[in-house]
Image (cartoon, helix red, strand yellow):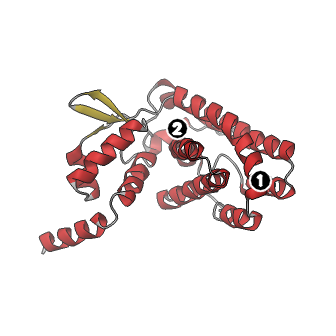
Amino acid sequence: MSQPTRSAKNRKLNSAEPAGAYELIMDAIVTQKLAPSQKVSENILTEMFAISRTTARNMMEQLTAQQFFVSVSPRITRVAPLTLLDVKQNFAMRKLINPELFAMAASQLDVAELAEINEAIFHEGPITSDAMALKLLKANKQFNVYVARKVKYPLLMHWVGQLEDTTMRIYWLYVKMHQHLPFTWDHQRSLVDAVKKDLSDDIRAHVIKILTSCEERVLGAIFLHEQLYRQDLRLPLGSEIQAGKSPARAS
């Protein structure tokens, strides 16, 4: 009975290759089912995601080129570590790119559509499930990628997509520790209002304000958690997360 069931599952997942395979693997990297610095191989990806060896090989090459996987030796590939340097670099690059990106795209954006995308980020109460956390992080990525697409510069779109995937890895840590996003839906709504007015200086200021606030919250969460501060940013166990929280820190 088990073999036909497994074959049916394989056929279902294989039908989504290769684009679907990329999303499955990236979801696992973000949620740390493929943890930072974990060893990966074609066999591991084939078994874990029920994809063909050819697709697994292609995904390893693509993710290595994008620096989500790193080749330690000809025989060993690992998930890229997530370090404090990666966090700082991600925020620095988004502070350089995103303010100009939103200002450039403003006149091309459908504000109603942008507002609708922003609605998908809205969530009341603590984020207590991994599925909800991933859904909200993907919605936030879509918000920024949508803007990048309106600029219609392929290289810029590629950079933004890669930065947003790393952003999901970073924000995942924060959500798991604090059960909410490092920004509020109201912050994004204010940005949408600025885009609607098409005032470039206001748009840039809103983007910088959001990113600066997020960076402070994320770095604060890391610095207040001794285990994360001292090692590769592999998510601790639930009990360790609670022990690392600062009871006096306000959201």
Position of the C terminus by quadrant? top right
Q: Using the rendered image of the protein, determine whether residue 251 is visible from the camera's viewpoint.
A: no
Depth check, front residue: 14 or 157: 157
Whether 85 is drawn above or below 151: the answer is above
Q: Using the rendered image of the protein, determine whether residue 154 is visible from the camera's viewpoint.
A: yes
Which tag, 2 or 1, sits closer to the chain's start? 1
Q: Residue at x 54, y 47 (%)?
A: 161
Whether 174 is drawn above or below 229: the answer is below
Q: Give residue 6's position: percent from left, percent from top.
A: 19, 68
Residue type pointed to by label 1: Ala
Whether 138 is drawn above or below 166: the answer is below
Depth check, front residue: 195 or 109: 109
Look at the numbered disc 2 and give the secondary structure of its residue: helix
Q: Residue at x 67, y 38 (%)?
A: 97
Position of the N terminus by quadrant? bottom left
Residue type pointed to by label 2: Ala
Q: Give residue 201's position: percent from left, percent from top.
A: 85, 42
Q: Residue at x 34, y 57 (%)?
A: 18
Q: Which residue is mark 2?
A: 243
Look at the numbered disc 1 and give the secondary structure of its residue: helix
Depth check, front residue: 47 or 172: 47
Task: Assess disc 1: are there few (<14), some (14-19) or many (≥20) residues with their C-alpha within 10 Å of its C-alpha.
Answer: many
Q: Give residue 230's position: percent from left, percent from top.
A: 48, 24
Which numbered disc covers residue 172? none
